[in-house]
Image (tube, rainbow, N blue to C red):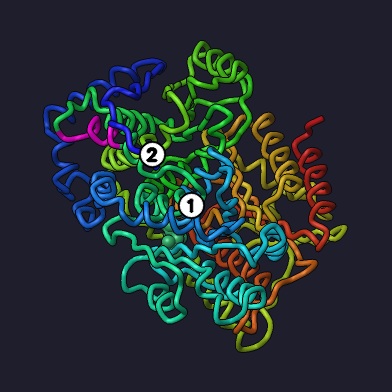
Amino acid sequence: MHSSQPSSNDFSLETLSLPGDLPGQVESTLAEWQAAGHVQRLWDGDASLWTGTDEAAWLGWLTIVDEQIADPHHLRTLADDVKSAGMTHALLLGMGGSSLAPEVLNMTFGEVNGWPQLHVLDSTDPAQIRAFAGRVDLAKTLVMVASKSGSTLEPNILKQYFFERVKEAVGADQAGSRFIAITDPGSQLDRLAQQEQFRHIFYGVPSIGGRYSALSNFGMVPAVVMGLDAVRLLERAQAMVRACSAEVAALENPGVRLGVALGKLANHGRDKITLIASPPLWDLGAWLEQLLAESTGKIGKGLIPVDREALGAPDVYGEDRVFVYIRLASAPDAAQDAAVDALEHAGQAVIRIPIADIEALGQEFYRWEVATAVAGAVLGINPFDQPDVEASKVVTRELTSAYEATGALPPETPLLEADGIMLYTDPQNAAALNKAVGDHPSLVDYLRAHLQRVQPGDYVAILAYLHMCSDHEAHLQSIRHLVRNTQHVATCLGFGPRFLHSTGQAYKGGPNSGVFLQITCDEANDVHVPGQQYTFGIVKAAQARGDFEVLADRHRRALRVHLGPDVRQGLAALEAAVRQALGAT
Ligand SMILES: O=P(O)(O)OC[C@H]1O[C@H](O)[C@H](O)[C@@H](O)[C@@H]1O
């Protein structure tokens, strides 16, 4: 790793192109921020800038870059250790804030010659777990277990599974030496890692929540393990820290400008933050989704991020969109440029963020963290809590405990069973759908009735508790685009349980404008969780049911489609049925 002096001007401010009186609205809010000294209040940790609750306790991310740069010893020592250990693979087990920044770094920078190839596993899907286990040579793999709380279900059971597998590969006495923990001091994972003599334990900062932790050890330790120059990323980020500081006027402050624009636009009905990134940065949206949705989606308000929706002609969009184009100057995409220009000319709201090169990723993490905190202030919510995530975890725990006690999940009655596909929903949604279908409803009838509930300004989210792989993704992307193109609404696609730790908060706690299509499946080849009665497949089923129960409890429009064990075939049938339901050709 080498150091270089950060320069204060190696990034650009965003540019806004907004319809109607929105430019004036954004400018006047920025002027208010300036006059009222709100940027100073943010840096002072004045909780009344938000909701006056515990916000001051969650601002450790503001200063983490300087702290890491002042003491990079642990990162340098780790780099030396990894380099000399001769491992070929690294596996990171974690969810949400503990996995998404490493995933983005991995997808953006790719494998670094001479360093372990990183795989980030954030699923309980048995097929996905098997696929990951098959991709690494467990005798030569460093496993990072990342969990701030140290008590999250998924990393805990994934750790149990991989610890057993590593024991088989290298022997019980060596297994601990292949594991690294990243967690807050004193957590259950910290204690376990000490007991089992993990190779390293790196600590998080208690005042930094998961989704704001990219530049703390949660992002930087995996960065080092995959061979990146973490100190350099941090130094580039430092230029952004300076530019976002209290001394910089709101009008010139990149994080504040972006946050005020996003908050203000959402208050004017443009709350679907449609993310467009140059191809090398395609995965950045996965991290942004969590930051934006989990931070702002609560008490019926919030920003709904729309990630990886293909760009369409202007007429497929409603007036609820903001397009944020994160454009890499070193590798721009001509088709994206043209499509975004067309949107701008059609009068859509477009924000352009120019980025010089991929090494600026660290500074972009920081810009967006500030912007999200600022947007939270404009929206009048606490951007540091996630009150609705816990609700589905509680139901999931009840279901897995029931399974441990009885050996089965509680029975359910389908709304419809046809050609190996079953539909489930709660009584309220069932009543609404049954009113809209005929006497002998088919799968297509129910899908049509469900999708006809979509109104302008709503969004449709596909929540797929399936193996996240390119085959499945292709069908699901095709379904979302059928919906977008025929109904002209925003569409989201999340894989469960991963999205529960990301956008799930906003789906349950944000504006009630979501129409949800949950997809589950039977497990063709389940995987047992060591030390438990249950399997990963049972956990995933319980997570889907827990999620659905809470969506229903919050009066969301939701329908669950249960595919058989042949997911590919089931998805093809579902895609055909959606096509028919929407009258699409
Ligand atoms: O890092 P952990 O404590 O394991 O938490 C992982 C994730 O869990 C929860 O779902 C939170 O809503 C997320 O904000 C968090 O990032």
Q: Which comes sooner in the sequence, label 2 or label 1?
A: 2
Span colored in magenta: 238-246
Q: Say left or right for 353 vs 135.
A: left
> Picture coordinates of residue 468 (x, y %)?
67, 52
Q: Quadrant of residue 454?
A: top right
* Number of marks: 2
Can residue 198 be seen in the rendering of this structure?
A: yes
- Along the line of sight, the residue nearer the viewer: 384 or 265: 384
Up the image or down, 161 lies above or below 464; here it is below
Q: Residues within 10 Å of mark 2 (few under 14, many from 20)?
A: many
Q: Secondary structure at mark 2?
A: helix
Residue situated furthest front in the rendering: 84
Image vertical order of residue 246 relative to residue 466, above or below: above
- Residue 389 visible in image: no
Q: Which residue is mark 2?
A: 233
Q: In x, y percent, where is residue 186? A: 32, 74
| Of 453 and 116, the residue lying toward us | 116
Q: Is residue 31 left or right of residue 468?
A: left
Question: Within 8 Å: ligand 1 and the Cβ of disc 1?
Answer: yes
Amino acid bearing label 1? Ser
Query: Residue 502 got which mark?
Result: 1
Q: Is residue 283 left or right of residue 238?
A: right
Residue at image coords 74%, 50%: 446
Report how far apart the C-alphas of labels 2 and 1 lie in the structure.
24 Å
Please state which amino acid type lies under the numbered disc 2.
Answer: Leu
Residue 364: image tag: none
Q: Residues within 10 Å of mark 1 (few under 14, many from 20)?
A: many
The reply to whether the C-beta atoms of the residues labelled 2 and 1 are less than 8 Å apart is no
Name the residue located 48 percent from the left edge and 53 percent from the top edge. Answer: 225
Tell which quarter ligand 1 is in: bottom left
Q: Secondary structure at mark 1?
A: loop
